[in-house]
Image (spheres, rainbow, N blue to C red):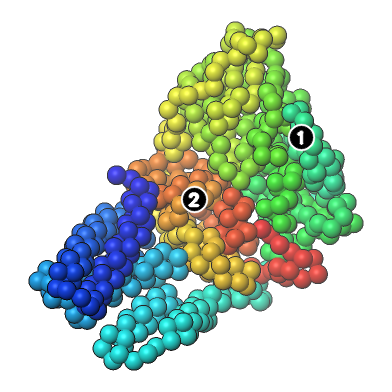
Amino acid sequence: MSTAPLIALDQILFVLVAGLWGAAGGFALAAARQPGDAGAVRRTSLAAAALCAAAIVMTGLRVLVTILLAQVGWWFVAEKVTLALPLVVLPGLATGVVSLPRLLRGAPSALAAFPPLVAAYGAVAGIACGVIVSYPVTVSDTVAVLTLFTGASAITWRILWRGRAVNLWQVAGVTVLLIAFVWAVTAGWSGGHLHDGHGTSAAGTPVDRLIGPKGEDARRFTLTAKAATVRLPSGQSLDAWSFNGQVPGPVLRVRQGDLVEVTLRNELADQGVTIHWHGYDVPSGEDGVPGVTQDAVRPGGSHTYRFRADDAGTYWYHSHQNSSVAVARGLFGLLVVDPAGASATPPAGDHTVALHTFGGRVTTSLDGAAPTDLLATSSHRPGTPVRLRVVNTDTLPRTVGLAGVPFTVAAVDGGDVPGATELTGRRIRLAAGGRYDLAFTMPDGPVLLSADGRPSLLVDGGGTPATAQPPPASGPPLDITTYGSRAPVPGRADRRITWVLDRTLAMVDGVPKLGYTVNGKAWPHIPTPVVREGETIRITVVNRSGDTHPMHPHGHHVQVLSRNGVPANGLRMDTFDVEPGEVWEVVLVADNPGLWMSHCHDLAHAVQGMEFHLAYENITTPFDVGGPAENHPA
């Protein structure tokens, strides 16, 4: 059984265990206090005994599930072993020794009722663990959960043995306030932001000096952010933000080795903008993250980005100011770097394909044209080499497939795939922000690109009727981490980092709420690892949550070492989908000094806390979140 079903089973069990222990404790208490004939007391006692037995069995099953999860990794069971299970298992054992014999004899008492009631509180505390506690378990987590548990147990003891009147609402209120105070002070407001000081010396190099070169021979572009309207062929008309009045923005196409210079101008009424070069390892000062590498460009302002296009491949760009809103509304475009020596005119069969959701409908933009929520089309003569540069600009994964022709995944996230082999009818999961270059030779018949089973792009030989299009690909999904031949990977790690992804209670925008966390904290409180240039960093990424997280480290690609313990092909990626219950191991070479954001590219998750940083020693930043520029990277 894989990890995700075990996690789901565990979540079902801890609710079921809490309900059974609560019912068992309630019946045991009712039997102890029940007036009337001995028959009624015995029936209630036996019902309590049956519930206690069922609760013990379900608790044992939860212990078994925890043991199975522990074999996957300590990350999945830390709070269960150290907090949740002891709080229910120990009073559960007491129930079996003390309560069950009395209840089976029909001799209920306060002593028999107390253990199952405490077990119920322990089970409820276990549910609280699922909301409050992540990995690693902290002192604040422990204090908060134990306060809840001991408070309820003490109140019950006082009621059962002392017989004194207690205002339960007042006690409960004080307990909740104490938990919130302890948790907020010890966990919620702990540091993690770059400006809290994590090895970045005030005497170091400012990040805004780590910029690209100037040159008279630069390829120059101007991108102007302005309001626009997206009109879909199906009839919807949507307000949007655009670059140069078009959505998506213009395709920037350069050759490897070119010096690229892009001037960003902002004509939006009340929205700042930046440009982040997604997947392109530019100098840190050109990364376009407001509050880290620059201030957001305010309305009427401008900013120029420069970088050398050293790496050929398929990439994209988008605003990183309020990115969860800006990207969704259209502030993005594609970047293609052709190999050095390539013709100034792209081959006829070389296409960019942007997949994006507008108005709740998945659209296709072919070669930078206006998006369509119907079927995009292109025509090529049989024998023409075709390359579809498919980019997922959405915040959710897309499953793409090609039907009607054998094809290869020629490149992933801009990098060629060594040993790529032909596929027929296979489907491939494409992470949010990720890119696949699908290559094939045009056959005599039509070829259909589908996204999530929906026809997206039809490539025909000129005049193929729509009725002749093949059905969407429906073959088995491809594991991209085992596709192609194995690439060499660094054999030694100078440093190890763990990112445990979760959804727990955290301080998000200064307010305690259910957020998306890394190692139990939400931005800006996630500690910043500080690395040295040249180090090899081995990163373990663990997803404890029920959501998929497409992880995107800026300024670097990673090589995939393993997925769920299965050795991978060393594929280079800059955005990789970590599904619920998965464990990925990747390696990152620290070869691009700067201050780098890393985050989940489901941008709704990023704005709710799942963004953090990787810092190089002695690199500083003069920028901060908020301020006059109203910097807001998520």
Report the residue at 29% width, 63% height from top: 20
Left or right of residue 333, residue 198 in this image: left
Residue 600's spot in the image, x, y percent?
56, 53
Residue 71's spot in the image, x, y percent?
27, 55
Q: Residues within 10 Å of mark 2 (few under 14, many from 20)?
A: some
Report the residue at 63% width, 62% height from top: 595
Report the residue at 22% width, 73% height from top: 31
> Which amino acid does the dot numbered 2 rest on?
Asp
Q: Nearer the viewer, residue 545 or 392?
A: 545
Left or right of residue 236, residue 316 in this image: left
Give the structural element (helix, strand or loop) at label 2.
loop
Residue 611's spot in the image, x, y percent?
58, 60
- Establish if 394 lies above or below 191: above
Give the structural element (helix, strand or loop) at label 1.
loop
Residue 600 seen from this side:
yes
- Establish if 357 lies above or below 171: above
Gap between marks 1 and 2 measured at Cα: 30 Å
Residue 311 seen from this side:
no
- Establish if 496 lies above or below 405: below
> Which amino acid does the dot numbered 1 rest on?
Gln
Left or right of residue 65, residue 214 in this image: right
Q: Which quadrant holds the N terminus?
A: top left
Q: Which quadrant holds the C terminus?
A: bottom right
* Label placed on residue 303: none
Among the 4 quarters of the image, the one containing residue 79? bottom left
Residue 315's spot in the image, x, y percent?
65, 40
Q: Nearer the viewer, residue 26 or 255?
A: 26
* Label placed on residue 236: 1
* Label placed on residue 547: 2
